[in-house]
Image: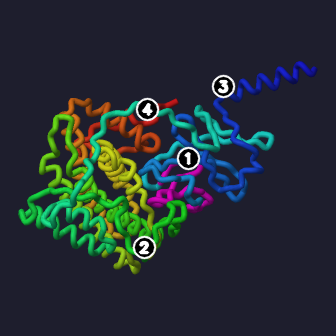
Amino acid sequence: MEQFEEDLVEALKDVVKAGNWQCVGDAAKIKSPCTKFYADDGEHIVLVRTEEGRFWAMDSSCPHEGGPLDQGDIEDLGDGKLALICPWHYFDFSLETGSSSTGLQNQVYDVRVVDGKVYINTQSTLSRYPVPVAKTAKTDVLSPVEIKSASSENTLCFWATKILCTADPKEKVALTKDVQRWWDTGKITEIGECAPPNQPSRMDSLTVVEPGKIKRGKGGTQASRVALLHSLANIEQWAIDVSWDIIARFSSVQLSTGDSMPQQFFSDFVKVAGDEAKHYDLLEERIKELGSSFGALPVHNGLWQSATETSHDLLARLAIVHMVHEARGLDVHPQTLSRFAAQGDTNSVKILKVIYTDEITHVAAGLRWFTYICSKEGRDCLTTFHDLVKLHFKGYLKPPFNTEGRMTAGMTEEWYVPLVKPSS
């Protein structure tokens, strides 16, 4: 009988392994609402524990822009349906299905509690601690050149750096519009060189907090819409800075051919900066109309984290910021628009349509200069892009994709579909 029991235990272990059930700990010891487990394939998982003691699991990286869902809040969206809320842009993901009112879909995993142990059904090996990442071979990067002396005031880089060091968002917007006009009319003709700051300036009254500390109003309320508009305005302010940063930081970069970036590269990103300034203005005014103001809510610096991650390589910056993050903005546009339309908020809908049209051109600009550099340097565009995304972006790209919007920007499916998690 004793031998039979031992054989049974071993057989059950084999069943668990074959079913990809990973034991992650004692249910009684998992007290936190959200616990992150690190996966060996980089697709980390958040285990959610509700107040009733039920467990759910999904990918910990938000399918929108990689926000940390393990730092999010659990909300009741009505009828007892619980959702995990991304702390970056307040996107909701059903604990049961992973679906979102934004149209996005997150991967969910079956969870079972057996004999007081919590099991997650996944092919990945899970750990409470980060999994060491094997170092990849170093690839050629387009690094900024060390700047020995600053340019005069009559250069684009001087003003780019000045804008980055301008804390007041209204002044930042006004100065951006001035510099765009001066560049377009020929008042400024030289690109110049200037070392940009490691971090753009922000007003002391603006509370920048860890993403997980940001709270929002309940879904469907005016408070929720204000929170989303506030989040978008924050993103636009960072987008202004990212646009000027790419100009200043990579002004002296040289391709392997010995060529510098052409003037049109800088003109394109001056326009992007001007568009982002326009977007901030529109959103800030709309927030006022709804009885609030920019700065009334805490903000995060998620976009700048991506800029910092890619500050050493122009190709990586173009790939991650403009071809991943901005393209993701196109993906969520339809559902974001319908959310405001459902509340009868036509003024916000008009603003979102303007932003969407401009963002298509921003994705196109990133794609255009990414392919330009690859062509000049004899690199395979698709392979280079895929390698950079895997290196610098958290997790896989996740459907649904706005195929029409991406196609308008010139981004065909061959660019992003290979970066989707393979079906098991």
Q: Which residue is mark 4?
A: 136
Instruction: Give the magenta part as a residue range.
Output: 75-100
Q: CA distance from mark 1 to mark 3?
A: 24 Å
Q: Which residue is mark 3?
A: 18
Q: CA distance from mark 4 to mark 2?
A: 39 Å
Q: Nearer the viewer, residue 243 or 404?
A: 243
Mark 2 or mark 1, which is nearer to you?
2
Q: Nearer the viewer, residue 314 or 254?
A: 254
Residue type at the position of mark 3:
Ala
CB atoms of marks 3 and 4 within 8 Å = no
- Give the colour scheme of this rendering: rainbow
Local crowd at mark 1 within 10 Å, few (<14), some, or many (≥20)? some
Q: Residue placed farthest to the left in the image?
A: 186
Mark 1 or mark 4, which is nearer to you?
4
The mark nearer the N terminus, 4 or 2, is 4
User: Which disc, if any, is residue 288?
Assistant: none
- Residue 171 place in picture, x, y as percent: 27, 74
Q: Secondary structure at mark 2?
A: loop
Local crowd at mark 3 within 10 Å, few (<14), some, or many (≥20)? few
Determine the main secondary structure of the stretch shown in magenta. Answer: loop
- Residue 305 sits in which quadrant? bottom left
Q: CA distance from mark 3 to mark 4?
A: 31 Å
Q: Nearer the viewer, residue 130 or 274?
A: 130
Q: Which residue is mark 2?
A: 206
Local crowd at mark 4 within 10 Å, few (<14), some, or many (≥20)? few
Residue 86 inside the magenta-drawn segment: yes
Residue 341 in view (yes/no): no
Q: CA distance from mark 2 to mark 3?
A: 52 Å
Q: Nearer the viewer, residue 404 or 294?
A: 294
